[in-house]
Image (cartoon, helix red, strand yellow):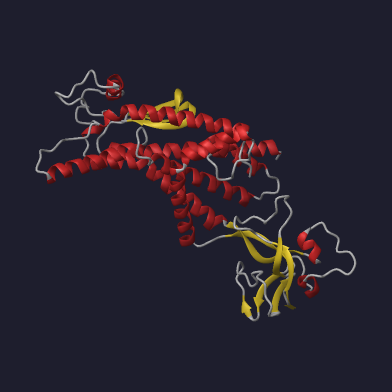
Amino acid sequence: MSDSVLYLIGILIMVFGIAISIGLHEFGHLIPAKKFGVRVPNWAIGFGPKLFSRRIGETEYSFRLIPLGGFITLIGMYPPEKPGKERKNRPFANMISAAREAHSEHVQPGDENRMFYQLPAYKRIIVMFGGPLVNLLLGLMMISSALVFVGQPQRVNEIASVIECVDQMVDSSANCGQNPKWTPAYLAGLEAGDRIIQVNGQTLSRTEEFFNGTVDTSNSTYSLLVERSGKQVAISISPAIAALPYAGADGKVAVDAEGNYLLRDRGYLGVQWATDRVPVGLDTAFNASLGMAAQTMGFIVQFPAAVYDSVSSLFDGSHRAGDSAISIVGIGQIAGQANADQSATFADRLYLNLMLLGSLNLALFAFNMIPLPPLDGGHIAGGIYEYLKRGAYRLAGRPDPGSVDTALMAPVSGIMFILLLLAGVAMILVDLLNPVGL
């Protein structure tokens, strides 16, 4: 297939995967809501005009024109104004009133006891947590599946190529010239494709390192058993020491102000190791996916600063970091580039798409858990606050204050919606004008 077709396929995979993730998120709200008796008139992926809709029971399921999210409609999302608490002169009174009446057109005879606000706080929390929980489980499942069934790229004990002389250790295009200093691997007769299966009589696992490149003044000699073209070959090799490039604290090759490699004495063999996809155990994969979830939660705290840094890159001409904030457009670009790489195997593409969609679901979980409306975390925080308030009143011997009036947070919800919209538009522009490269 052509690069453009593969690029488009990568984008479509992301669009389809995001749509499924959003739809399942909304089912995470819908199923417990229905279980608790709340009527749910609408379930939708996207916003704006309907492209397709179908009514099943009392719920209309639809796909809409603008694929930037999804929603369900719960009747009675906010409680009515408490008698005697009406304040027409309250700041944002119209906005609060509009929030109470937002779904009133869906209320029908017989719905009097099917309102969301009538549920106990713990049930409201379950309904609102259902959506993010689905994204968390999807993210953990996709990332774990990528690691267990496809495998992550990892260095293995197979030789991709043998470097002949020390000059080529510094500059791969260098000519060995006259009187070269041959590498230990070249002198020992190692060849590309050799797989190290034993070291000093001990069987070596596929990814186990037997030489770490540290300076070794003991002149150790390793007895290797090598598998070559189906046969086993015994080889002895003694590492040598030379001034070679090294990795800095950031994991990149250390360079000076002019971009030249910095050198220091290191032990070396003179081989380039092959990489392959190595599946890991389920426990290792699950722990890794949990670690990614924790990192994502931490990134959400830094999200405003990350958006600012990304937008700043448009004006200072700097390249964006690979871990910078990114929009759905940027995710589609990365998927398109990766799928269009003609050197990538099916396993490479499958791994990347699973990791991207898994990471996106973890981001949806973390983002929705922000304890501010209109996000799910804002409603969850309201339920928790209600428990704490009622508990405090009980301890103080005061009458039950009743449900918390979350409609009063409608102004915050409106401000958050505007900020999130602006951040989303800004990140889309950044991704179009200064995209993150692979």
Q: Quadrant of the N terminus?
A: top right
From the viewer's perspective, is residue 87 above or below residue 59?
above
Residue 360 visible in this rendered orientation of the protein:
yes
Q: Residue at x 65, y 70 (%)?
A: 214
Q: Residue at x 44, y 41 (%)?
A: 364
Q: Residue at x 21, y 43 (%)?
A: 388
User: At which x and y percent is residue 374?
Assistant: 36, 32
Q: Residue at x 31, y 23 (%)?
A: 102
Toward which corner of the image does residue 402 lie, by quadrant? top left
User: At which x and y percent is residue 239?
Assistant: 72, 74
Q: In the image, 206: left or right of 27?
A: right
**Outermost residue toward the right?**
178
**Outermost residue toward the front?**
257
Q: Quadrant of the C terminus?
A: top right
From the viewer's perspective, is residue 334 above or below residue 279?
above
From the viewer's perspective, is residue 195 above or below residue 116?
below
User: At which x and y percent is residue 125?
Assistant: 28, 41
User: At which x and y percent is residue 160?
Assistant: 73, 62
Q: In the image, 245: left or right of 62?
A: right
From the viewer's perspective, is residue 382 above or below residue 232?
above
Toward which corner of the image does residue 192 lie, by quadrant? bottom right
Residue 56 visible in this rendered orientation of the protein:
no
Toward which corner of the image does residue 198 lie, by quadrant? bottom right
Q: How many numbered tags mark residues here?
A: 0
Viewer-nearest residue: 314 or 401: 314
